[in-house]
Image (cartoon, rainbow, N blue to C red):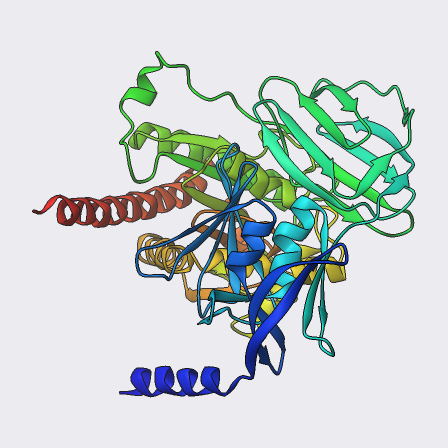
Amino acid sequence: MAVLAQEETAEQEQEAYPTGVARLTLDGNPVSAVPFSLTPQGPLVALSPIAALLGTELRIGPLGDSHRLIFADKEVLVGPGQATMITVKRAADRQEISAFSRPSIKAAGGLQVPLDLLAKTLGDELGYEFTWNATELRLELTRREVRELTASIDVVHQHSSTVEIRFSEPPRYRVERRPGALEIHLVGDLLQQPVSRARTRSPLVRDIAVATDHLRIDLAENAGAAEPRLLLSPVVRLIVEVFHQPALPEEGDRSAERRPATGIRTIVVDPGHGGGESGAIGPSATAEKDLTLLMGRALKRQLERRLPVRVVLTRNADVELPLETRTAIANENKADLFVSLHFNSSFGPTAHGAETYFLSREASDQMAAQVAAMENLANGGLRNPEHDLQLILWDLAQTYHLAESQRFANLVQEELNLTLGLRDRGVKQAPFRVLMGAMMPAVLVELGFLSNPEEETKLQTSIYRRELAESLVRAVIRFKTQMEAREGSAAAVEELP
């Protein structure tokens, strides 16, 4: 009854919106009409006539709920009652989730959407501005003015490579991933030629090709690139982190033959910290970064010994990786599960036990917020307003995996508590940046308190670390079994006549 009442209220509110038909103009010339609704948050306009005008394909599901806007190698999925959209990059087999100002609605002319949705899709991709003229009831489409930007390129290589592209103004761009390359296409901007380039060599970057309207970073074999980050201070820079990733199995690899077609096939294990970022330090100077690497290697060995899975470590040496790069490695490897390993610290020496987290914008309690704040400062993760926006968007993305992340976190916590007799500090939610961007179930595990002398002593022994790893393996086995049983049941239902 409550749901029905909410639906009736929503319909009443929708009917109360002022509606009409506006003129649709392109570069000042009238071309057609577009139905609209005026809401307190701004106008909603019919998507269909705009898609037709700009030559993009719009596919509508049989029930009129799903709408696919198709252009170039992308599909944008939107629907009534939703304030988010999913962008599917088909060539790269990747999905991104973005939020816009208010939900779309079903009304005159079909699905009506807010202007910022149009700006984030057709505007950014095809180079158009969308302006609502409320006085004359007109939706104005104008081609973006072409700007000429100057740019310079530098590449710095240590354990990974950083490609830095400096611009004279913030660029308008979109990113496309192709096999062995990452392309940055300018939208409404052009690059003045020639573009100056430093001659720094990188074993991970084969070449950087520059044209007036795009740049292409050609990657070495077994190299991957994180999503570009635009920094506006102290100078305008687009940063692309390039990292080494293990090769995918060859076709004749027997380990690949024994993997199931569904379920958990690839697991990415992330040993936290590394390089100049030591993490927590125990009373006898044990560094968290060293223990997480030992744990990561042990967990990889046991998982591959017990299960038909491929396990990828984000780092297999004492190297420093940006937090964004860690989940980028998981996405590049199309992981089915992401596990970030850490050890906790407290001002008091008596705190002990394990904690398991999954991503949320809001921490479940004050202690969870403090743990996340400390971890987020590691590996160059200084607080930045851009990170807050990214967290909002990736929190939306993780809602698609929220139930699975929570389910796996509960299994991890159960195994650690029961097997080792650890104090149950519970499963918690917190805004961990290392979990941002993970397009799969993802958890962060704090496996003990290095600040506790007794726990530090136990963690220094390989036997205890193997027991911890074994607990995690059992949690993975339980999670894998449950997931594949659900997938099998779903497949059986689909096959019923």
The one nearer the camera, 414 or 130, is 130
Q: Which residue is nearer to you in this view: 196 or 24?
A: 24
Q: Please say whether residue 391 is visible from this viewpoint.
A: no
Residue 206: which quarter of the image? Answer: top right
- Number of dots carrying numbers: 0
Q: Position of residue 463 (x, y in %)?
A: 42, 38
Q: Which sits in the foreground, 296 or 92? A: 92
The percent coordinates of residue 473 (x first, y second) are 35, 42
Classify residue 270 by image quadrant: top right
Q: Position of residue 66 (x, y in %)?
A: 39, 57
Residue at x-position 42% and y-position 43%: 337
Residue 177 in view in this figure: yes
| Viewport quadrant of the N terminus | bottom left
Left or right of 435? Residue 425 is left
Question: Vertical placement of 21 versus 92: above or below?
Answer: below
Residue at x 37% of width, y 62% of height: 65
- Left or right of 253 on screen, residue 245: right
Q: Is residue 104 above or below residue 466?
A: below
Q: Out of 132 and 152, give the one closest to the viewer.
A: 132
Q: Quadrant of residue 326?
A: top right
Task: Determine the residue positioned at 62% across, 71% down.
Answer: 22
Of all residues, the one furthest to the left in this rendering is 497
Q: Is residue 263 left or right of residue 425?
A: left
| 185 relative to 203, above or below | below
Q: Position of residue 153 (x, y in %)?
A: 86, 30
